[in-house]
Amino acid sequence: MVQTVNLSKDLGFLRIGAAVPALKVADVDFNVKAIIDIVEKAGAAGIQVLSLPEMCITGYTLGDLVQQESLLAKAADGLNSLVESTAGSNMMLIIGLPMCIDQKVFNCAAVICGGQILGIIPKTYLPSYKEYYENRWFVSSEDALSDIVHIDGRAVPFGTNILFTLHGLPSAIIGVEICEDMWVPLAPHEYQALAGATVLVNISASNEILAKADWRRTMVSSESGRCIAASCYVSAGTGESSNDVVFGGHCLIAENGNILKESQRLLPDPSLITSDIDLDRLVHDRIILNSFRQSPAHIKPFRVIETYVDDTAATGLLRDIDPQPFVPKDPARRAERCHDIFSMQVAALAKKLTGAKIDRIILGVSGGLDSTLALLAAAKTADFLQMPRKNIYAFTMPGFGTTERTHNNATSLCKALGVNIKRVDISTSCKAHLSDLEHSGSEDIVFENNQARYRTEFLFNKANELHGILLGTGDLTEVALGWSTFSGDHMSHYHINVSVPKTLVRYLIRWVADEELSGTPAQKVLYDVLDTPISPELKRPVKGKISQMSEDVIGPVELADFFLYPLVRLGTRPGKILFLANEARKQKLFEGHYTLEDIHRWLMNFIKRFFSNQFKRTCLPEGPKVGSVSLSPRGDWRMPSDAEPALWLEDLENMYSKLRR
């Protein structure tokens, strides 16, 4: 029997929406019905928190009509009608309207849920420049006399110092502000975030002028990043008066600096956008970024109001899943990322050489992806330092498992790049060592590590002899999985690829081939390297072909990197990672074809390997951090080598039991 996976309880997501209903200026009955219609659509979509535009009950472009007693009374009636009509819905609604309180008119946001008005938030900053005249009609929240307003005999919290929480979901804390409040220095949402708000809602009536949409995108995305929060922005639509301006109904949902969903503008019909916000990610980033906690503490106390919203089944997740979290989808951005990483590798290696007053680089080349990238970075660094490429000493060290294809590619690439290349066959030395060990020669761990350790010993000694530095080649994915021989290829003087994941290594090499080496003999070699199976080549070939496939042991690298990013960067629970990977599988986002059982098996393998191989990461050599994920024991990752993975495996199994049939 399939158990339900709940969006919020099990996955830490919150489904939020931004809606622009149909509108007629000053026709409250029409507007209330239009709001109810779009609320019903939102309910069918499983939305838990829905935001609607500023003054949407009456229309924003009322002019002096907003001070008319009949309009204000009708707006209050309209709010009550909405409360009654949505009483059976456990969805939080944030709705704009004008309200007369203490003989003053305020531009307000009413927050309602389950047949109750939870709070009224008045606008603070009233624009009165160019096309705006709000000081003519409204009073700022700073001039409010009361912190409670009575509606139908019930006392309702009133003010800007109100936050809303959702029962059973402690990480969902919602702050509300209105339009201009977002655009000022030290905006209300910043104080809300410092007080714990993870979802920042701005209901607006922002008119359209050329390039203003770009500025909104910048503001909403950047403020969500600065506040480590989700931002939901909704603006008035084309139903507003066009006497002097036009409104486009621009809606945006962003999370921690990234826009997740955006509406089309200037539509004739109502619009609704929805996204699932990852609250767990926001809380994780706030936990680890201590500078966020060090922000000014002089924050006025907030009143916290709790309500209940329905959880929803996590089917049809309303959120894009990136199957390659380390690799940008957009080709232009991907090329820019490759350029930046390669440039950082070159700059880092150049500094390491000049700082050590060394002008020679030694490395082993195998014809595989990682040593190829290291060799390319070394060659570019030589050019960067105006140093002869002959100062790079590359060694092919064929052993028991080396194939002709990889050896030829390594040799051909070195020659094409103009670096020193020498072949050192390690078979005889390794056989002698196995004999000393009284080893049978069977292909066990001793047989494999003997080759890896001898290669490293040779390279270190050669580096001493040539007064150079030994350049390591392993990548971030291998570091996470411990796919290296301790005191073998695990060690070097400088680990140039240490924070580059395997999925990105491929794109980097292709980028160098196409952008740096296009039309050269090296380009063709690089294409063949990219087509070569990933292997340490420590077991004997079969009919001249590679017999040992890394992905048969550590799993498909695209899955390994999919697991690695959320686990290390976001602190995501394994069960949630499994769910997301399964969603990506169902959407056929991965290059490989997997079953749920495949993903479960490889994720379990990843967790076990990640925990059991921390001892290798604890003594990693130095290497440059180039992305947001690093496992450097001196920088980003400190973990005991004897920690138990039981909790993580238990979480994985709990989710697996819900997903499998």
Image (cartoon, rainbow, N blue to C red):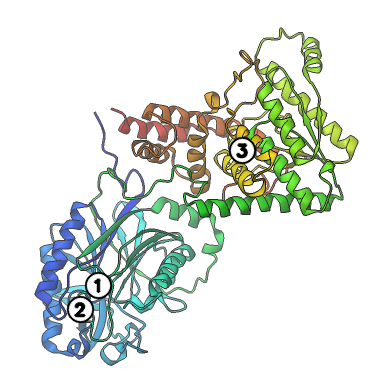
How packed mark 1 is, by other alpha carbons closer than 10 Å (few <14, some 14-19, many 20 or more), is many
Of residues 244 and 474, the one nearer the viewer is 244
Image location of residue 568, percent across then percent down: 53, 44
Which SS class for mark 2?
A: loop
Q: Which residue is mark 1?
A: 237
Amino acid at circle 2 = Gly
Of residues 292 and 365, the one nearer the viewer is 365
Question: Residue, x 74% and y 22% (percent of image)?
Answer: 398
Instruction: Pick the quarter of the image with the N terminus.
Output: top left
Which SS class for mark 1?
A: loop
Q: Which residue is mark 2?
A: 59
Q: Is residue 479 visible?
A: yes
Q: Which residue is mark 3?
A: 640
Q: Is residue 198 left or right of residue 249?
A: right
Q: Is residue 618 visible?
A: no
Instruction: Pick the quarter of the image with the C terminus.
Output: top left
Mark 1–mark 3 Cα distance, whole angstroms, equals: 55 Å
Mark 2–mark 1 Cα distance, whole angstroms, equals: 10 Å
Amino acid at circle 1 = Gly
Image location of residue 218, percent across then percent down: 45, 68
Q: Is residue 193 left or right of residue 112?
A: right
Circle nearer the viewer, 1 or 3:
1
Of residues 275 and 411, the one nearer the viewer is 411
Q: Which quadrant holds residue 503? A: top right
Image location of residue 400, percent across then percent down: 71, 17
Mark 2–mark 3 Cα distance, whole angstroms, equals: 60 Å
